Image: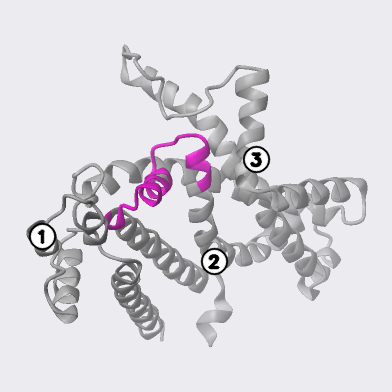
C-alpha cells in the first residue's frame, strides 16, 4: 500500500510539473515576444527583426517552439537574459543560494518560535499570556512584509544604526578569512531574516495554538492525566507531537506565499536572491528570466507539497491505515 501510495503522489507531482511547464510556455507568449520591443525602434529593419525571431526560435510553428522549449528545459537551458546576456540558468544558480539562506533561516526560526508560542498560549488559554501572544501574532500576520522590512530598517539601520540596511556583504571590503566573511553575511542576514520570520510567525502560531487546543481536549490526554503523569510531561510527550501534524501541511501550503514574501523582502533589503532577480526582470521586461524564475518557484512549491505528503504519511499512522 505504501509503495502504491507514494507512486501516486510522485505521479501527481510530475503531472503538475508538466502542467506548469505547459502553462509557463504559453503565459509568456501571451505577454508578447522580444521582437515587439525592437520593432518599435525607428532604426530597426525587417532583417533585424527576423534575425531576432530566429535566435529565439519564434519563427517556428507553435508546436515546434514548445518542443524546443521542453527539450531545453530538460537540459537546464532556460535561455539568455535580455538584460545581462548571461544564461538564465547561471543567473538562477547565482541567486538561488541566497534565497535558500534567507527563506531557510526565516522559516526555521518562525516554525520553532511560532510552535513554542502556540504551545504556551494553548496551555494558558484565556490568561493574559494567551491574549498577549495572540495579539502580537495577529499583528504580525496582518502586517505587509514590505512594511515590516521598512520598519526594521528605520529602527536598526537608521535610528539605532547597529545593523546594515541591505545587501548580503559589505561592499568594497576584503575579508581576512572565510570566517570573517561568514560573520559579515550573518550580520547582513539579521534584518531580512527577521522580516521573513515575522511574516511567517503568525501563521505558525495560530495553527499550533488551534491544534494544541483541540488535542488537549482529546480523550487520550485525559487518560494520560488520569494515570498520574505530570501535566508538563503529558504536554511534551503526547500533546505536542500530535499537534505538530497540521504544521507539516501548513509548511507546504504556504510555500507559495513564502515565495511572494521573499520577492518583496529581498527587494526591500537588496538581497541578491531569486526574489530580487524576479523584481529586476519585471522592471526590465526580461521575459526569459521571468520564465525561468517562475518555473523554479513552481517546482519548489510542487516539491514542498510532495515532501509534506511523504512526511505526513510517516508521521500519522492513520494515513497508512486508509
Q: Is residue 274 magenta?
A: yes
Q: CA distance from mark 3 to mark 1?
A: 43 Å
Determine crowd level at label 3: few under 14, some 14-19, many 20+ residues with C-alpha closer than 10 A.
many
> Tag 3 or tag 2, which sits nearer the N-term?
3
Residue depicted at x 13% and y 67%: 57
Determine crowd level at label 2: few under 14, some 14-19, many 20+ residues with C-alpha closer than 10 A.
some
Q: Is residue 273 magenta?
A: yes
> Tag 1 or tag 2, which sits nearer the N-term?
1
Residue situated in front as seen by the camera: 154 or 301: 154
Residue situated in front as seen by the camera: 241 or 307: 307
> Label for residue 253?
2
Q: CA distance from mark 2 to mark 3?
A: 22 Å
Tell me the quarter of the picture where residue 173 sits: top left
Label 2 close to label 3 by CB (< 8 Å) = no
Residue depicted at x 23% and y 49%: 81
Q: Secondary structure at mark 3?
A: helix
Give the extent of the magenta segment: 264-288
Position of 49 compared to 266: left or right? left
Question: In the rendered image, which residue does mark 1 sit on?
Answer: 55
> Label for residue 148?
3
Query: Eyeballing the image, is 270 above or below 140?
Result: above
2 vs 3, front mark: 3
Q: CA distance from mark 2 to mark 1?
A: 39 Å
Amino acid at each position: 500500500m505504501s509503495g502504491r501510495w507514494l507512486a501516486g503522489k510522485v505521479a501527481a507531482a510530475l503531472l503538475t510539473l508538466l502542467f506548469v511547464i505547459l502553462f509557463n510556455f504559453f503565459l509568456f507568449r501571451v505577454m508578447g515576444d522580444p521582437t515587439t520591443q525592437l520593432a518599435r525602434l525607428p532604426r530597426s529593419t525587417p532583417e533585424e527583426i527576423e534575425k531576432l525571431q530566429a535566435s529565439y526560435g519564434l519563427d517556428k510553428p507553435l508546436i515546434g517552439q514548445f518542443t524546443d522549449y521542453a527539450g531545453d528545459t530538460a537540459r537546464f537551458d532556460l535561455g539568455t537574459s535580455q538584460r545581462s546576456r548571461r544564461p538564465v540558468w547561471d543567473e538562477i544558480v547565482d541567486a538561488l543560494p541566497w534565497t535558500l539562506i534567507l527563506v531557510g533561516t526565516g522559516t526555521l526560526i518562525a516554525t520553532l518560535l511560532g510552535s513554542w508560542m502556540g504551545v504556551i498560549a494553548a496551555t494558558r488559554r484565556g490568561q493574559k499570556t494567551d491574549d498577549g501572544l495572540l495579539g502580537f501574532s495577529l499583528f504580525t500576520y496582518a502586517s505587509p512584509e514590505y512594511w515590516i522590512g521598512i520598519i526594521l530598517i528605520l529602527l536598526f539601520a537608521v535610528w539605532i544604526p547597529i545593523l546594515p540596511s541591505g545587501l548580503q556583504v559589505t561592499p568594497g571590503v576584503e575579508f581576512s578569512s572565510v570566517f570573517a566573511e561568514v560573520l559579515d553575511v550573518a550580520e547582513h542576514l539579521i534584518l531580512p531574516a527577521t522580516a521573513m520570520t515575522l511574516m511567517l510567525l503568525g501563521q505558525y502560531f495560530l495553527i499550533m495554538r488551534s491544534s494544541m487546543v483541540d488535542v488537549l481536549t482529546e480523550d487520550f490526554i485525559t487518560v494520560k492525566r488520569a494515570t498520574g503523569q505530570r501535566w508538563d510531561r503529558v504536554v511534551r510527550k503526547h500533546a505536542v507531537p500530535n499537534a505538530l501534524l497540521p504544521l507539516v501541511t501548513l509548511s507546504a501550503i504556504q510555500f507559495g506565499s513564502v515565495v511572494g514574501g521573499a520577492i518583496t523582502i529581498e527587494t526591500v533589503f537588496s538581497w541578491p536572491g531569486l526574489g530580487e532577480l524576479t523584481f529586476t526582470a519585471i522592471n526590465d521586461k526580461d521575459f526569459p528570466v521571468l520564465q525561468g524564475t517562475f518555473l523554479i518557484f513552481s517546482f519548489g512549491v510542487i516539491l514542498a507539497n510532495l515532501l509534506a505528503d511523504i512526511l505526513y504519511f510517516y508521521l500519522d499512522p492513520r494515513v497508512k491505515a486508509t
